[in-house]
Image (cartoon, helix red, strand yellow):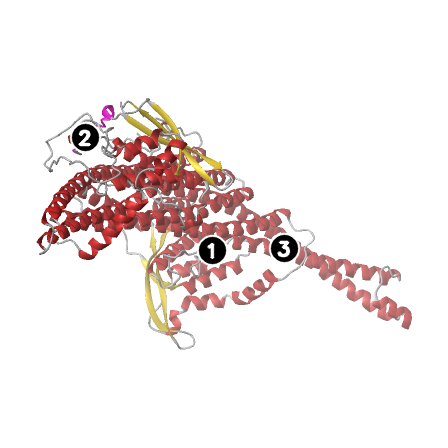
Amino acid sequence: MADSGSEDIAVIGNTDLTPSESENNIKNTMVEKGTNLLKRMEISVAEAEKRTGKNAVNMQETYTVYLVETRALDATSEGTTPVPDSLWRRYSEFELLKNYLLVTYPFLVVPPLPEKRAEFVWHKLSADNMDPDFVERRRVGLENFLLRVASHPALSNDKIFYSFLTEKSCLLSASQENGWKETVFETGFQAKADSRLKALNATFRVKNADKRFADMKHYGDELQSVISQLLRVRARAADRLYGVYKVHGNYGRVFSEWSAIEKEMGDGLQSAGHHMDAYAASVDDILEEEEHYADQLKEYLFYADAFRAVCRKHELTQYELEMAGQDLTSKKQQQEELATGTVRTFSLKGMTSKLFGQETPEQREAKLKMLETQIEEGEELVKERNAECEEFVKSAWVDIERFKEQKDHDLREALISYAIMQISMCKKGIQVWNNAKECFSKM
Amino acid sequence: MSGTIVDNNASSLSIPTDIAGHMLDLDDDDDLEVFSKDTREGSSFNASMQTSPGSMINQYKFEEEEEDIDTKDIFVTVDDPESYVTAIETFITYRVVTKTTRSEFDSSEFEVRRRYQDFLWLKARLEEAHPTLIVHPLPEKFVMKGMVERFNEDFIETRRRALNRFLNRIADHPIFSSTEDFKIFLTADVGALTSHKKQGPGFLSRMGESVRGLAATVRGVRNRPEEFTAMQEYVEAFGQHISSLDKVTQRIVREQKEYLEDLKECVPTYTLWSNSEEELAEPLRGMASCLERCYKETEEQVKELNDNLNPTLHEYVLCTETLKTVLRRRDIIQAEFEAKTEALLAKHADREAIREDLYKMEDRLEWANNALKSDWTRWKKVMRTDLRSAFMDTAEKNVNYYEKCLAVWETFLLSQRTDAEGTQVLDSS
């Protein structure tokens, strides 16, 4: 009857791939391209639990802990699945891990954590951190974070990361409970963290930044802006769609009441009402899947921060190189002036010496010697910084390329799973309204 | 049965009716009463009526499986709204086209122009002549909510459709369609209509009726037959439900429109994003295009709700008022009869004269009751058909909507998967 040109559409198998399946697709890709770590162990964040305890200022607080499970993979080949090792971690510990990685590997794009507070919410979603739906989505996000780190060629070999996953927290003494944390602090990364933050926020002008990094930073800005906008609009649209579906539930109620006063129409109305109720209820699943899509976008929103930081770091190293170079040049110039007695450039020293008399030959000698040492050191520094810069550019660019590929793949998968979700939604709609039409025809 | 789709130009054929050809059909278990001659002034029962009063019996069989189009011998359409400007006022006129094979019409085709006031006049005349028959409601004079302008295109179109439905209901009604007023409405030129309007009782008799009505209402009906009480209860409940459905539908339209606003913003965002990307540019543009197409489909779906389901439900809200009025009128007639009966028992009453009146009133009451009962049955059938097809059409449109959106997304998915998997070929059927 209704012809919507569907003859032109190809029959596609497997349009019913669920979002969780496609999430697994991303995970499988991570495992396949696998690092040594992932080949050796299975990692998951299996559960979440509420805890209460005393915090640093001795006040009572409620917080959530997440169960990090790891299982050695080679053991499974013996046919038995061993019990996984597990330990509980708080969000703040994940944060500590991430900050450690950021500071220790400034040339790598470190995977982001799921958001600290719920943002871009629409009315049905709670902005409360204790809300079970939020906790569940955070659990998934944390697992994703661990898998991302574990699948990174360089990061996966980090010892601190390994001990985060495996070190049991001893329940006996308070200090040992924080064993891992202490290990992290012992690395002294905190000091680097502070200077990193300062550097990231400083303004300085770089003369010869690598154009690729400048472009990448610009891209990061654009990506952040556009994904934020998308998330905002999408949240509003989700709200509206929710309203549309739910109002249909009223049809169900009224049909039911109306059917009571009708003889012939009663049955048709009553059964149509049931379908309207089903239609109204179906939106909950639909929007849950949409949230999943939003989470995938959010991950890349936060990723943008990470690779912007890398670009910034490049600028910083480049800047330091340029500063060292400038310093060296000026010292060489001073040397020349002193040696030849000519004043090329205006300097206060030169003026005062003109006004107040020249230095003695001994003084000049001493100065020249000092300058020579300084120049030697300067040249060493420039060489060092240059090497640093080149090294940074090399490793960072490799990782950025890796990241770009990952991003293109993941986001494309996200778009595909969005389409699949829409298809599922349309199919449900067709079914419900066909059923309703059937019931209406019996009115 | 396929859902009837309301077409702008065709007369609505949702009611199959047996008209003049069939006279007394004794199959139905409802009472069949012969209408007595109408004794009230300004009757629309005149010589142009076919054959005997028996033909006015409204026993109508509605074949639900087949549409008996063959027996329908009059087709009316209301279309082509035009602005008519005079020095004093501006108003809209509509073209009314009639095609008929009825012998009381001088010709087989007529075309006249009518304005809203003319429709109001027709309705009033029919109600006056048949106080206990159910006249389909007219669209309201002026819709205040939503600040609709009188000359706004959408308003005019919605009104035109409602007028079309109104006229078709009249044409399908066995009694109304045979009235002189209806015939004149369809055929007379503007001048003739105006002079015809001036004749006839109109205002004053209506005044008289309402004054009598007030008195009778104060008195109240003593022995209302059970079936009319049942009708009243039904009408109360029905009114509430239909009113709720009307509100629900309006709410859905509102929410959908807001949803459209938000959906609209998504499109340029994806396009903007695609400008920053290389590999992702194409799928992102694809997304934008999908959302755009879905947007258009959603727009159409809302339009369908707005143009079809909404007005139909609204008309039945108005119907409820009509039904209440009709039941009230019947009550008044009965009350007057009961009052007269009591007057007979008064000591110094003029028994002869009163008895004379009493017979007339008894007839009148019986006639009114029977008219209402039959028309009630007819109305219920029409209502059932109308609402059934309105809901079926909506359901069908929704199915179409989802089918179209499904196609959009499947195409997108296909393009993405073929891209990703290189030379993979998927079979089309």
Q: Quadrant of the C terminus of chain B?
A: top left
Mark 3 or 2: in front is: 2
Residue placed under numbered mark 2 in the picture: B63
Disc 3 and disc 1 in contact, CB within 8 angstroms: no
Q: Quadrant of the N terminus of chain B?
A: top left
Q: Is residue A197 left or right of residue B322?
A: right
In the image, B40 versus B218, the foreground residue is: B40
Discs 1 and 2 share one subunit: no
- Image vertical order of residue B91 relative to residue A52, above or below: above
Q: Specify the segment rendered in magenta.
A: B59-71
Q: Is residue B147 magenta?
A: no
Residue placed under numbered mark 1 in the picture: A112
At label 1, the amino acid type is Pro
Q: Is residue A364 left or right of residue B43?
A: right
For the residues labelled 1 and 2, the Cα–Cα distance comes to 69 Å
Residue placed under numbered mark 3 in the picture: A315
For the residues labelled 3 and 2, the Cα–Cα distance comes to 84 Å
